[in-house]
């Protein structure tokens, strides 16, 4: 640890199951539970919330998305706050296959980006391993939804509902049959169910 300099201790790994494809829906199990340490935060753990910084770029991205008057009322409200909460509501599986579903993420590498659910079930095959993933592409096929280093980022919609967690992606120029960069994510509903199957009762903070 010394070669990395001073580090903040956020917590300890409570449980990390083996990475594998599960029989339930053919999803790739790739998650870990981390128990947070109070010393790593100035806010009480019981008061921590999932929040994202409100930047000018974020405001412009959200307001430029076309939609009905009803749809706009349901969108994230920024006001004068420097942060906006995401969750605890989740996007139901029945809505994740909607090709009109607009989603966002704030990744370590590419920051805020916006994309659309592909609406088609995606199967990833790496050697002899095949898994089912939630497929997301950049808005109107323009800027990629994610970049290398964004794995683990939370995907949410314009209402602040959590949709899933980014696991991987595929660049268009690395696949002659694709015209767009593709991002793959694991639906949060399945993640919570899988965590429960391992004996943990996990609830998203509100």
Image: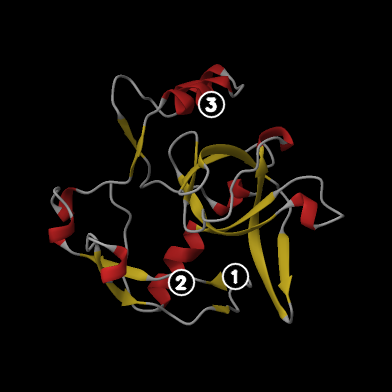
Residue 187 percent across, percent down from the top left? 53, 58
Q: Residue at x 28, y 25 (%)?
A: 81
Q: CA distance from mark 1 to mark 3?
A: 31 Å
73 with respect to 113 (left or right)? left
Crowding near the residue tagged with mark 3, few <14, some 14–19, many ≥20 C-alpha atoms within 10 Å = some
In front of the other: label 1 or label 3? 3
Residue hosting label 2: 194
139 with respect to 85 (left or right)? right
Residue 200 percent across, percent down from the top left? 32, 73
Element under label 2?
A: helix
Could you tell me which quadrant the N terminus lies in? bottom left
Tell me if residue 168 can be seen: yes
Q: Residue at x 52, y 78 (%)?
A: 19
Q: Nearer the viewer, residue 28 or 70?
A: 28
The disc at residue 55 is none
Q: What is the image's colouring?
A: secondary structure
Q: CA distance from mark 2 to mark 1?
A: 10 Å
Q: Residue at x 45, y 43 (%)?
A: 161
Residue hosting label 3: 61
Q: Nearer the viewer, residue 88 or 143?
A: 143
- Sequence-first tag of 1 and 3: 1
Q: Nearer the viewer, residue 25 or 52?
A: 52
Tell me if residue 98 can be seen: no
Residue at the farthest right position: 176
Residue hosting label 1: 27
- Sequence-first tag of 2 and 3: 3
Q: Are marks 2 and 1 in contact (CB under 8 Å)?
A: yes
Residue 108 percent across, percent down from the top left? 45, 49
């Amino acid at each position: 640890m010394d070669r990395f300099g001073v580090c903040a201790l956020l917590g300890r790994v409570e449980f990390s199951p083996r990475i594998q494809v599960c029989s339930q829906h053919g999803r790739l199990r790739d998650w870990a539970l981390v128990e947070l340490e109070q010393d790593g935060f100035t806010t009480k753990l019981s008061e921590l919330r999932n929040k994202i910084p409100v930047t000018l770029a974020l405001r412009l991205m959200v307001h430029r998305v076309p939609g009905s008057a009803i749809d706009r009322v349901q969108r994230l409200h920024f006001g004068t706050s420097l942060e906006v909460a995401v969750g605890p509501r989740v996007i139901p599986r029945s809505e994740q296959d909607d090709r009109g579903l607009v989603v966002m993420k704030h990744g370590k590498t590419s920051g805020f980006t916006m994309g659309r659910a592909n609406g088609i079930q995606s199967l990833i095959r790496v050697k002899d391993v095949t898994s089912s993933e939630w497929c997301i592409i950049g808005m109107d096929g323009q800027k990629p939804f994610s970049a290398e280093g964004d794995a683990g980022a939370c995907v949410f919609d314009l209402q602040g509902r959590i949709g899933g967690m980014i696991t991987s992606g595929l660049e268009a120029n690395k696949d002659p049959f694709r015209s767009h960069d593709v991002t793959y994510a694991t639906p949060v509903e399945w993640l919570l169910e899988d965590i429960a199957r391992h004996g943990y009762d996990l609830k998203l903070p509100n």
